[in-house]
Amino acid sequence: MVDADDDWRQAAYEVVVEDEAGGCETVRVDSPDSVLVPWPVAPLTSRERATVSVRVLAGDGAVTPWSEPLTVEAALLEPSDWSAQMIAPAWDEDVTSSQPPCLLRREFVVTGDVVSARLFATARGIYFARVNGSAVSDSLLSPGWTSYDKRLRYQVCDVTPLVQRGDNAIGIAVADGWFRGYLAWEGKRNWYGDRTAALAQLEIRLSDGQVVTIATDTDWRAGQGPIRAADLYMGESYDARLESAAEGWDRASFDDSAWSDCVTQTFALDTLTAQASPPVRAAESLSPVSLTQTRAGATVVDFGQNLVGHLRLKSVDATDGERIVLRHAEILHEGELFTEPLRTAKQTDDYLAAGGGAVASWQPQFTFHGFRYAEIAGWRGPVPADAVEAVVCHSDMQRIGWFECSDELVNRLHDNAVWSMRGNFVDVPTDCPQRDERLGWTGDLQVFAPSAAFLYDCNGFLDSWLADLVVEQQPDGGVPFVVPCPVDADYTFPTYVAAAWADAAVIVPWVCYERFGDIGLLERQWPSMSAFVDACHRAHGGTINRELFQFGDWLDPTAPPGDASNGMTDRHLVAGAYLVRSLDLVVATAEVLGRSGDAARYRSLADDYRAVWRREFVRPDGLLSSDSQTAYALAVCFRLLESDADYTRAGARLAELCEQAGFRIATGFVGTPLICDALTTTGHVESAYRLLLQRECPSFLYPVTQGATTIWERWDSLKPSGEVNDAAMTSFNHYALGAVVDWLHRCVGGLAPLAPGYRSTRVRPLPGGGLTSARVSHVSPYGEHAVDWRLADGQFQCDVTVPPSTTAIVDLPVEGWQQRRLGSGRYRFEGYFDSLNM
Ligand code: BGC
């Protein structure tokens, strides 16, 4: 049954671009392309503005109304646009531990009426800027973390409402952040330098056409405020008694005569790049769900959700010199915070109160913590529930994907993956957000990228991270384990071709292309992608080089707690499989980019390595040398076998292994995103559901039954005995094993991309496991796609939404169903459920 079928298809579009002088150009493009199309007129130059409207023409001649006009503005595109210098306070510092953030300020007079004002700013460290007492933006932790030596992002803020005729002041606070704070697990700091600094250029256009530029230089003054130390791992210390001395530092007429001079630093302006990814912001606040007292009289607050951010004290009950200490942890042990898994990350903020009455509110500015529980010590008596909240912070990406089904535990598993993404997309895609790591581990992102790209619009976020991957890539093509890579390792080839981790160089760009249709990103990444597979080929030398360092199927449940790569799947089998996978994707990329010569060359390499893989890892009886869930999942999903019969046999063996394991999961980071797909594509849908729905440890749902609110690093981060697994490497917020949600979206919900950016989709729900309904929806660049099915009394009913200019190939488990191709519209189908049609 068709509810509303309009099969709307674009034939052409028109763009009107109006420049600042009132000039107007209208461009008509006969093209069905509606996503990431080329800019239709001459490129804007630095600071240039234009107003753009669009309308679209359908094949039948119908024309849409013009869109609301959108104003775009170019940032500073050339190093020569900058007159600012990188400045730092002139004082000496002991940089062996966390330092107070510096405050940099400058007053200036504006002699005309302000038409517009822009602040272009960045820092060596993390900063916030204020003009005339107001914050210039609500972003946090700017400029974020990039490979600072090679790429430093600057932020652009419209500060027109803040600048006034007459006296003005600008202030910038800079803290250690990733630049010189503690980073990685060896207690090291000052990775990028030992002096924090800022670079800012405030450009003010006056009504008489004059442009006044206030730029960082030696006229600025430097001081300190109440923040006495700030570090991402360690936390923040605040001394409210120092507030009054710095009161008004960000306004005109502040006496900074006792402040210090500033000195300039050498800085390569060509490392500057405008920020294209969303900034980190406070996304929401959570109230406590319970408060309890510890034996020592501190209050433990439970927010009911493991999260990333910080506490906001809405009122502070303390006076002169009394210290309130806030500690954060993901779990409790006997009613107290259990902080061992944090290793050296202290995650402790403290607030030293001043005399003179109640304080309105306080929150740290330059740190973030991973926690569900917080301990508040030093408060007089119990902390009232309404005095504190948790502020959730992450890169401010738009949510674009949703899933729910009739099983509440599965829904919680899905929510846990969403929360782990939120907690680990804090400017850089990290392994975990709490212990002394929080690094851009390539393998973790590689496995989670498809899930991430469904849940949030993370194209800009990943584009920025991939630009760092490019600049961190070795001249020999190797890709470091973490990006950005603060590690000054004694690197030698071929360490950086570790399978599933370094393959992020190929797989993540491909995922962005597949999910967002961003061909420009693919073009930019091509040199990196091809250099990486070339490096792998050189490292393996046409065979499987068993001497190479590999992470293997990291953390499969049989790996000893202290030896995560030593699981049941031969790590070199994993390496060979990934080499073929990356070669296949490089072939596909070369085809998209019209590089037929490259496509042919890499195809022949992929064929060779497939043959090598089979020779090495497929036994004469057809079983694999590692008779493990992950090995078969790789063979099936990466198309490593030869004949249909081989796939049938591999699928059957995989299902058998799952059954023998009592449908407990036996995969690590590598096998987990693949196993349910491998089962479903070989016809073992019920086995996939039994794996999904298993609750005994290890399984997807075991953590959920233990009250998990994020995805755990290990299947048994908390053991059934209630003990925490090997505290040296046990996080409760690690998205990697949450990668199964991509299968929930594509196979349980039944919505998968078929053409880049979801221009065409495959609608193919696979009911099973006793589920009676599922609903999946995704806002692609074309609009909202949705599949919503329910099963009752043998009747299957399914609503499908297909957005304009896209098509869907629909396969439903309904008696007598014939595959259909749908144009845009809303549809309802129903019929007798028939699993043979799946
Ligand atoms: C991280 C992982 C990472 C791994 C690789 C761990 O410490 O937390 O998620 O991929 O190291 O060695």
Image (cartoon, rainbow, N blue to C red):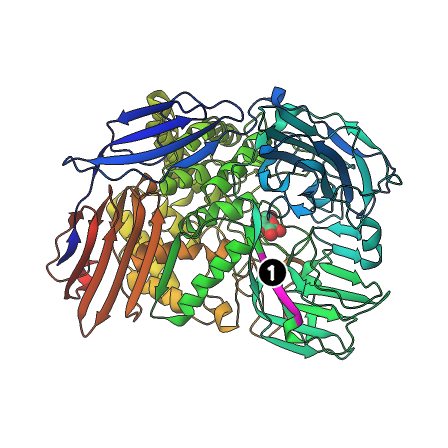
On whether residue 391 falls in the magenta region, the answer is yes
Which image quarter is the C terminus in? bottom left
Q: Residue at x 46, y 63 (%)?
A: 415
Say whether residue 40 is left or right of residue 705: left
Q: Residue at x 65, y 63 (%)?
A: 726
Check the image and report above or below for 817 versus 520: below
Q: Quadrant of residue 639?
A: top left
Q: Secondary structure at mark 1?
A: strand
- Residue 304, position as x, y percentages in the image: 56, 70
Q: Quadrant of residue 640?
A: top left
Which image quarter is the N terminus in? bottom left
Region of the chain picked out in magenta, as a range: 387-392
- Residue 275, position as x, y percentages in the image: 55, 36
Say whether residue 822 is left or right of residue 372: left
Q: Could you say which is closer to the camera, residue 792 or residue 713?
A: 792
Q: Residue at x 27, y 26 (%)?
A: 28
Residue 791 seen in the current view: yes
| Residue picked out by circle 1 | 391
- Residue 222, position as x, y percentages in the image: 81, 38
Three-letter code for the amino acid on which mark 1 is drawn: Val
* Residue that protrudes farthest toward the left in the picture: 816
Q: Main secondary structure of the magenta part?
A: strand
Classed neighbour count for the residue bearing mark 1: other residues with Cα under 10 Å, few (<14), some (14–19), many (≥20): many
- Residue 202, position as x, y percentages in the image: 65, 32
Say whether residue 458 is left or right of residue 369: left
Q: Could you say which is closer to the camera, residue 391 or residue 733?
A: 391
Count of number-bearing discs: 1
Say whether residue 738 is left or right of residue 731: left
